[in-house]
Amino acid sequence: MDFATEQHGCEHYRRGCRVVAPCCGEVFGCRHCHNDAKNSLEVDPRDRHEIPRHEINKVICTLCSKEQDVQQNCSNCGACMGKYFCEICNFFDDDISKGQYHCHGCGICRTGGADNFFHCDTCGKFLHDIRSAMILLTVPQQGFHQLSRCLCCNLTGCCYSNVLKDSHRCVERAMHHNCPVCFEVSGLCSMVFHSIILRKEIISF
């Protein structure tokens, strides 16, 4: 069964279900809705937390309100709760135009189409500073698709465009440095990087 996708979901995703947060037992449209609510300035700092996405095991169908185990189709009314569904990330999304796919090397779902990117195991070894991912997202001309660290299972990933498959400079543990672009541990680049992060944190408050 399918139904009008524009009438369901949240501000982040179009989907036919809500998730039950395993950490606090509350119901949210998605993990981003949970994290936004639980990390707002109005929440006591001691109570702030993020949802462990891989531990989500219950969802609620938005069509019939049936609470159930994580699955693509509702066990009660048969509605499809997400045209794209990943049972590893417990992720649902009806907007399949994003080209979602699960990267086993990164341990998370990505967008852009699995046929357009490849995972580099050498460049993607342990990411010492998760904030390094932020700066790569600002330099798409370098050919980086996304960087991430799965905090639940300690997997780290580096996905590149297929354009760079036979030409990218593969450096072991490259993401272990402060700057994964120039591989400097200290010096000017490090100072600039940390000043950018600090400025963003100040602005965000």
Image (cartoon, rainbow, N blue to C red):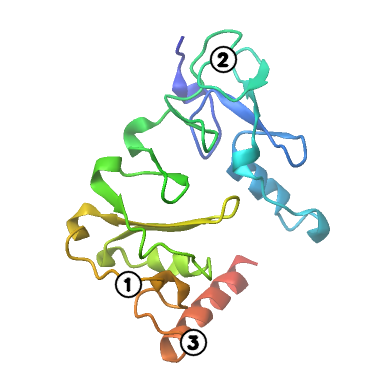
The amino acid marked with disc number 1 is Val
Nearer the camera: disc 1 or disc 3: 1
Determine whether label 2 and label 1 are within 8 Å by CB: no
68 lies above or below 152: above
Residue that numbered label 1 is attached to: 171
Nearer the camera: disc 2 or disc 1: 1
Front residue of 132 and 137: 132
57 lies above or below 125: above
15 lies above or below 176: above
Residue furthest to the bottom: 187
Quadrant in the rendering for residue 113: top left
Secondary structure beneath dot 1 equals loop
| Residue 185, image x, y percentages | 46, 85
Quadrant in the rendering for residue 203: bottom right
In the image: residue 115, left or right of residue 204: left
Secondary structure beneath dot 3 equals helix
Q: Residue at x 43, y 90 (%)?
A: 188
Residue that numbered label 3 is attached to: 191
Q: Residue at x 64, y 22 (%)?
A: 69
Give neighbour class at mark 1: few <14, some 14-19, many 20+ (Cα, 10 Å).
some
Q: Along the polypeptide, which appears first: circle 1 or circle 3?
A: 1
| Residue 56, image x, y percentages | 64, 35
The amino acid marked with disc number 3 is Met
For the residues labelled 3 and 2, the Cα–Cα distance comes to: 51 Å
For the residues labelled 1 and 3, the Cα–Cα distance comes to: 22 Å
Give neighbour class at mark 3: few <14, some 14-19, many 20+ (Cα, 10 Å).
few
Q: Along the polypeptide, which appears first: circle 2 or circle 1?
A: 2
Q: Residue at x 75, y 54 (%)?
A: 48
| Marker disc for residue 74 | 2
The amino acid marked with disc number 2 is Cys
Quadrant in the rendering for residue 142: bottom left
| Marker disc for residue 39 | none
